Image (cartoon, helix red, strand yellow):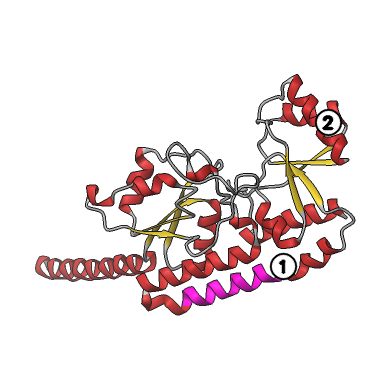
Amino acid sequence: MKKIIYWISCFVAIGCLTACHKTSQKTSDKEGLKIVTSFYPIYAMTKEVSGDLNDVRMIQSSQGIHGFEPSVSDVHAIYDADVFIYHSHVLESWAGRLDPTESKSDVTFIEASKGLELQRVEGLEDIEVGEGIDEATLYDPHTWLDPVLVADEVEHIAQELSQLDPEHADSYQKNADKMKAEALELVDQFSPLFASASRKTFVTQHTAFAYLAKRFGIQQLGILGVSEEEPSPRQLSEIKDFIEEYNVKTIFVERGSSDKMAQALKTSTGVKTKILEPLEADPQNHKSYLENLKHNLTVLARDLK
């Protein structure tokens, strides 16, 4: 009897080991590539293209990417990944200083905006890059707010992932084509609205919307010298002159900017403040990236109308 129990136990153990191995193998296959992205727009585009094939994460989600420097744990996460996708050598200049070989890492770097022609910041077109000049201050990186350039960036991500993982190339391209079609639909939907708008100029705290403005034939004006803290009396005076000169009715600020600043603007100038997201930080909602971008376009179109 003891021998029978012994052999039954052995068969059960062998069966369990086999089943556990199969489960582990299946989980590993499902995980696919381990992909780290730099910040929200790149994460959102990569996640759309990747679908459920890969493990996609981002290292900077709560704030904007300007001035961000990765922590030691961020760098470790990048080196531990199969793929690191960032926006541009201009915006994430720190990416060029990383050296995966130091950690014997095989991570592949993908610059999502590669092939796009970044435009100069208005007023800095003639300044040459040289010693003492930070290239990042001369170029506007905010391509992710123009639906057409979003489509271009998504296509590049799909092509790069297809080369790394040719087995799933069709899935990457299918997902990319879907997002590209949705992005171009936004252009078709909003172009007539901006074309017929009674006003063509909008004023922002964060001048992140130059590509968007160019795409839809409108103009962005930025309030210079305004930080996220309460404006000084001199700054408020300058803003008031600016508002009167351009007959400004609304100033667009980003979520998370100082309530004191918004209140000071309302009290001093009488203008309205509305939210227009640069979409640099995770908006913490259940909308897709293009749904968040559509919300931006809706808010802006209604105001200009």
**Label 2 crowding class (10 Å Cα cut-off): few <14, some 14-19, many 20+?**
few
| Quarter of the figure that contains the N terminus | bottom left
Dots 1, 2 in contact, CB < 8 A: no
Residue 161 % position (x, y): 41, 69
Distance from the alpha carbon under mark 1 to that under mark 2: 34 Å
* Residue furthest left as drawn: 3
Residue appearing at x 66%, y 26% in the figure: 229
Check disc 2 and give the amino acid type: Asp
| Quarter of the figure that contains the C terminus | bottom right
Horizontal side of 262 relative to 9 (left or right) equals right
Horizontal side of 35 relative to 116 (left or right) equals left
**Label 1 crowding class (10 Å Cα cut-off): few <14, some 14-19, many 20+?**
some
Residue under circle 1? 187
Check disc 1 and give the amino acid type: Val
Determine the secondary structure under disc 2. Answer: helix
Residue appearing at x 42%, y 64% in the figure: 54
Numbered range of the magenta stretch: 171-187
Residue appearing at x 57%, y 75% in the figure: 177
Name the image quarter holding residue 23. bottom left
Q: Main secondary structure of the magenta part?
A: helix
Relative to the observer, which residue lies in front, 88 or 184?
Answer: 88
Residue appearing at x 38%, y 68% in the figure: 30
Relative to the observer, which residue lies in front, 79 or 69?
Answer: 69
286 lies above or below 97:
below
Relative to the observer, which residue lies in front, 174 or 16?
Answer: 174
Residue under circle 2? 241
